[in-house]
Amino acid sequence: MVSPRNTVPPPVEASPELVRKYNQPGPRYTSYPTAPQFAENFDRDALFAEIAADNRDPARPLSLYFHIPFCETLCWYCGCNTVITRRRESSSEYVELLERELALTAPRLNLARPVTQLHFGGGTPTFLPPAEIDRLGRAIRSTFHFAPDAEVSVEIDPRRLTRGHVDAYRHLGCNRASLGVQDTNQAVQLAIHRWQPLSVTEQSIQWLRAAGYQSVSVDLIYGLPLQTPESFARTLQDVIALGPDRLAVFSYAHVPWLKPAQKIFTDRNQLPSTEDKLAMIAEAARALTAAGYVHIGMDHFARPDDELATAHEAGTLYRNFQGYTTRAGASLYGFGLSSISQTDGSFRQNFKELPAYADALQAGQLPLERALLLSDEDRRRRTLIMDIMCRNRLDFAGLSQRLGLDVAATYASEFASLADLEADGLVKRDPGGVDITPIGELFRRIIAMRFDAYLDRGPRKFSKTV
């Protein structure tokens, strides 16, 4: 196996012309097939048969996701599924719904399976008061069996965090936390409707460290309104000084047809140019690697001794709906509004609107809105695309052994379609496989798109790839 170049930053030498050429709408490939392929007219019996098959092996690990959709205010850049409210009673009502969903799901699972990963996302998981966090934790712990080294993580909005929240999630078992920061510049914060003084973020990290969280991650976004390469460089230095274990530096996803609040940015002509966005991610790569962080893949950085860096070096990195992870091979079971579940042969998603989600549960039904059963071809292409997203080489011999066919021959047309990417320096082809170059690391989504069999079946309603 070729060792990943995990000390090489993203392609600072990529030209603006190259970025403009390949800055196309495209999936983020947290799954394949991607979520637009999920359909409402799915075969429920076949789906439940797939779930039953997934649960035959008691040793196969589980990954759990709980979506807490509530936010007190709307951040105008946000693309997540949220419910904006300050009605505090929503917390207890929602936890009751999650308890109902757990009770309906548990009979379909092999509860001897070890949980190796649990993640709370949102929305804002810290919208729940500590008492409701404790209540939800009891329901989860009384249902599932956790591996001793399970990774339990929570997304945190520092603006709403109290010491009680920190302690409640730690008592539940959380050992990792990710903090939404996005940008530390006050003008940018006001433009995105998210006022968050740096001192608030610093206090949150201090509380988490003192409470015994093993890893603290910070999320940043480049391409936000009023950002400049110079202001984002200052944000990077502010965050580096806080000493997080991981950083995710996401490209802002401008999808105003899905999130109308984002129209504010175009109406006010506040978004930075493609050239400025390129300068921002280049500066992120330079500053973070200079500070000792390892580039994991696409938009993630971690300390060299972090699990993500170790998995990337070993070639065992995996990608799911929470991004990059070390817990490959686990089935994902999602709970809560809009959450997505994944077995080896299926995807399914809960209702995205709270009334429909609640109505289904109160009727004693799993709140499923959409699903997709995978074909053998879907699984094969998923393997290829996940290797592109997580590794720097497509190795024909290794892939052929894993998939039980001649990969080079079966996907000859797809590999031939990489000729223009090779001419532009994104990949290098040889008789044994395809390498993703340092320039190509910025364009992983573009490379993966060449193996996506669904892109020509409908409009590309995705965010730009860079």
Image: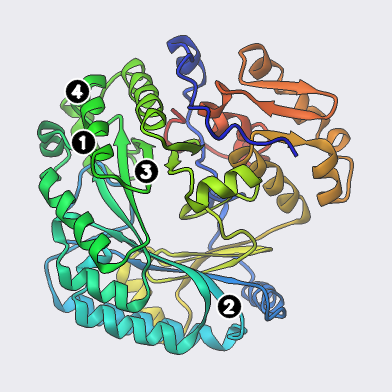
- Disc 3 vs disc 2: Cβ atoms closer than 8 Å? no
Q: How is the image coloured?
A: rainbow
- In the rendered structure, which disc, 4 or 3, sits on the residue that comes first in sequence? 3
Which residue is nearer to you in this view: 284 or 142?
284
The crowd level at tag 1 (other Cα within 10 Å; few <14, some 14-19, many 20+) is: some
The crowd level at tag 3 (other Cα within 10 Å; few <14, some 14-19, many 20+) is: many
Mark 3 secondary-structure assignment: strand
Give, as a three-letter code, the residue at label 1: Asp
> What residue does disc 2 label?
114
Q: CA distance from mark 3 to mark 2?
A: 28 Å
Q: Quadrant of the C terminus?
A: top left
Give, as a three-letter code, the residue at label 2: Pro
- Disc 4 vs disc 2: Cβ atoms closer than 8 Å? no
- In the rendered structure, which disc, 3 or 1, sits on the residue that comes first in sequence? 1
Give, as a three-letter code, the residue at label 3: Leu
Query: Which residue is at a point 81% across and 51% down the rendered structure image?
Result: 402
What is the number of the mark on residue 269?
A: 4
Q: CA distance from mark 4 to mark 2?
A: 50 Å
Q: Quadrant of the N terminus?
A: top right
Residue 83 quadrant: bottom left
Q: Is residue 168 visible?
A: yes
Residue 272 quadrant: top left
What x and y, as percent, mark residue 455?
A: 60, 37
> What residue does disc 3 label?
247
Left or right relative to 406: residue 433? left
